[in-house]
Image: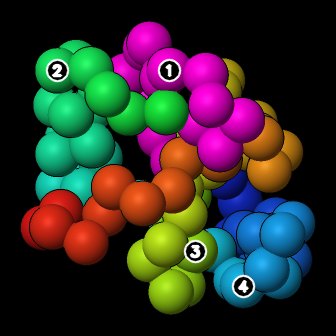
Amino acid sequence: MPISEDLLSILCCPRTKAPVRMLSADRLAALNARIEQGGVTYQGGEPVEKPLQEGLITEDGETVYRIDDSIPVMLVDQAIAGHFASLP
């Protein structure tokens, strides 16, 4: 079940307070390809081991938060940052 527009309108990055939007299918596929290759980490330093089903990206394009079972995981140490400059 997708995230409701009402919920999406109030979500923001807990660190920067930047608004978030859904990660596009192209960017999600590109990020998941990098995750499968290895080397993508969460802010807390742990490797991202599973591809994302869905994600939210900050408006500035700097940070992605995963969505697990339609629940946004808006925890700073579980954010993925720094891998998006070259994504489509």
> Closer to the N terminus: mark 2 or mark 4?
4
Label 1: how many Cα within 10 Å (few below 14, some 14–19, many 20+): some
Q: Nearer the viewer, mark 2 or mark 4?
A: 2
| Callouts 1 and 4 close, C-beta under 8 Å | no
Task: Classify mark 4: helix, strand or loop.
Answer: loop
Task: Classify mark 2: helix, strand or loop.
Answer: helix
> Closer to the N terminus: mark 2 or mark 3?
2
Q: Look at the image and tell me in which quarter the C terminus lies.
A: bottom left
Relative to 15, residue 74 above or below: above
* Alpha carbon distance from label 3 to label 4: 6 Å
Relative to 35, residue 84 above or below: below
* Alpha carbon distance from label 2 to label 4: 29 Å
**Which stretch appears magenta?**
42-55
Q: Nearer the viewer, mark 1 or mark 4?
A: 1
Three-letter code for the amino acid on which mark 3 is drawn = Thr
* Alpha carbon distance from label 3 to label 1: 20 Å
* Alpha carbon distance from label 2 to label 1: 11 Å
Q: Residue furthest front?
A: 45
Report which residue position mark 2 lands on. Answer: 37
| Callouts 3 and 4 close, C-beta under 8 Å | yes
- Give residue 58's mark: 3
Label 4: how many Cα within 10 Å (few below 14, some 14–19, many 20+): some
- Give residue 18's mark: 4
Label 3: how many Cα within 10 Å (few below 14, some 14–19, many 20+): many
Q: Residue at x 77, y 69 (%)?
A: 13
Q: Position of residue 73 (x, y in %)?
A: 76, 40
> Closer to the N terminus: mark 3 or mark 1?
1
